[in-house]
Image (cartoon, rainbow, N blue to C red):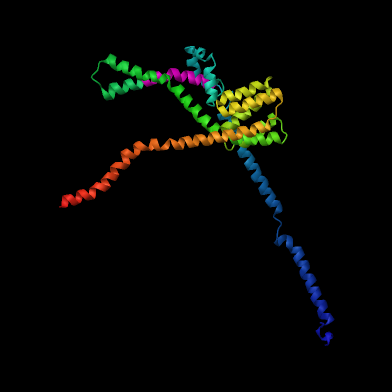
């Protein structure tokens, strides 16, 4: 086999190599212009997006801080009513403060608003009832009887703010009771990892905020109290007092004992987390067990008449046809 026949001519080989070198040089020179490196542009876009997200989060936090603040001042109108009629004495025993804190309202402004509404609501309800009776119903009863009826209905307005606050407390306790086992699991993980109780509370408050803002608020408030109160036991007791949930109070008792006697906290938190989870399951089972009696009346009123009509109507049609 003659290999020399397959070897190209040296001049042709040189020309081919020169052309390849020229092509490579052209590609190397034109590459930055044809295929531009977009890394810097992408980095600028990422930085711009990061800055926009940061600005948006700052705006959101500023709006939330402006909406909710423990140092919010009461409205001048409500404050004037409270000062004019000396309603502040009704809050001296601290019961109103406790109820409002359990409902999630803290500071001086909610107390002033509550006291003012408790005075305004009966008057507004009395005026509305009296106007409705005189202008729309126009009863034949004497005017004194109409005024007495409107006064009786208007007196219910005195209890309306308390009913509203109690409803808020019940809903808030349900939310806390539903999310508290998960908070205990997070607290157990942080405590067993070696974190201090303040750091553990702060971490749990940050992590549980997306699931339950109410629980996060209470935990972070307890963290703040742990940092400035001289007696740490008072901070734990305030947590149980603000929530009013038995599961939280049990955890508070364990925290106080661990703080006082140095008892291990991990096993107690694990047991209480399981107990709170069992309590939540038992409440769900109780609601499920109470569902059939609640459905009895709707079934009798709405379901049975239709069933009887479906069964009896064909027979009635046949009898009528005969």
Q: Residue 62 location, x and y as percent? A: 60, 32
Q: Residue 64 location, x and y as percent? A: 57, 32
Query: Image quarter for residue 291?
Result: top left
**Going 51% across and 35% down the picture, which residue do you hit?**
282
**Magenta segment includes 170:** no
Instruction: Say which of 5 and 246 sits in front.
Output: 246
Query: Image quarter for residue 199?
Result: top right
In the displayed orientation, state which residue is furthest to the left: 322
Instruction: Say which of 71 and 217 sits in front.
Output: 217
**Going 38% across and 18% down the picture, which residue do you hit?**
155
**Going 46% across and 35% down the picture, which residue do you hit?**
287
311 up-or-down from 301: above or below: below
Q: Is residue 248 left or right of residue 262?
A: left
Query: Image quarter for residue 98?
Result: top right
Q: Look at the image and tell me whether residue 123 can be seen.
A: no
Q: Residue 77 location, x and y as percent? A: 48, 19
So how many labels did they put on this image? 0
Name the main secondary structure of what is drawn in magenta. helix
53 up-or-down from 252: above or below: below
Q: Is residue 6 left or right of residue 149?
A: right
The magenta span reads 109-126
Q: Quadrant of the N terminus?
A: bottom right
Q: Is residue 89 left or right of residue 27?
A: left
Q: Look at the image and tell me whether residue 211 can be seen.
A: yes
Q: Residue 183 location, x and y as percent? A: 61, 34
């Amino acid at each position: 086999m003659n290999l020399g026949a397959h070897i190209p001519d040296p001049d042709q080989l040189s020309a081919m190599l020169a052309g390849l070198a020229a092509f490579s040089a052209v590609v190397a020179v034109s590459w930055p212009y044809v295929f531009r490196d977009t890394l810097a542009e992408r980095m600028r876009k990422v930085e711009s997006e990061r800055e926009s997200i940061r600005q948006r989060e700052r705006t959101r936090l500023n709006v939330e801080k402006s909406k909710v603040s423990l140092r919010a001042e009461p409205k001048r109108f409500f404050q004037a009513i409270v000062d004019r009629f000396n309603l502040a004495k009704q809050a001296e025993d601290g019961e109103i403060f406790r109820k409002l804190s359990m409902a999630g309202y803290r500071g001086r402004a909610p107390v002033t608003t509550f006291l003012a509404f408790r005075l305004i609501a009966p008057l507004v309800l009395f005026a509305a009832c009296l106007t409705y009776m005189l202008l729309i119903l126009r009863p034949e009863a004497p005017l004194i009887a109409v005024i007495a009826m409107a006064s009786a209905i208007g007196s219910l307005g005195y209890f309306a703010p308390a009913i509203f606050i109690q409803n808020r407390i019940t809903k808030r306790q349900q939310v806390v009771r539903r999310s508290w086992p998960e908070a205990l699991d997070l607290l157990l993980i942080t405590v067993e990892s070696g974190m201090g109780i303040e750091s553990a509370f702060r971490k749990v408050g940050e992590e549980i905020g997306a699931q339950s803002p109410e629980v996060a608020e209470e935990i972070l408030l307890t963290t703040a109290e742990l940092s400035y109160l001289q007696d740490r036991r008072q901070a734990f007791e305030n947590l149980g007092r603000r929530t009013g949930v038995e599961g939280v109070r049990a955890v508070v008792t364990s925290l106080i004992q661990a703080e006082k006697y140095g008892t291990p906290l991990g096993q107690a938190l694990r047991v209480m987390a399981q107990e709170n989870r069992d309590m939540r399951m038992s409440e769900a089972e109780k609601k499920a067990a109470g569902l059939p009696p609640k459905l009895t009346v709707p079934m009798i009123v709405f379901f049975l008449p239709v069933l009887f009509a479906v069964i009896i109507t064909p027979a009635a049609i046949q009898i009528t046809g005969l």
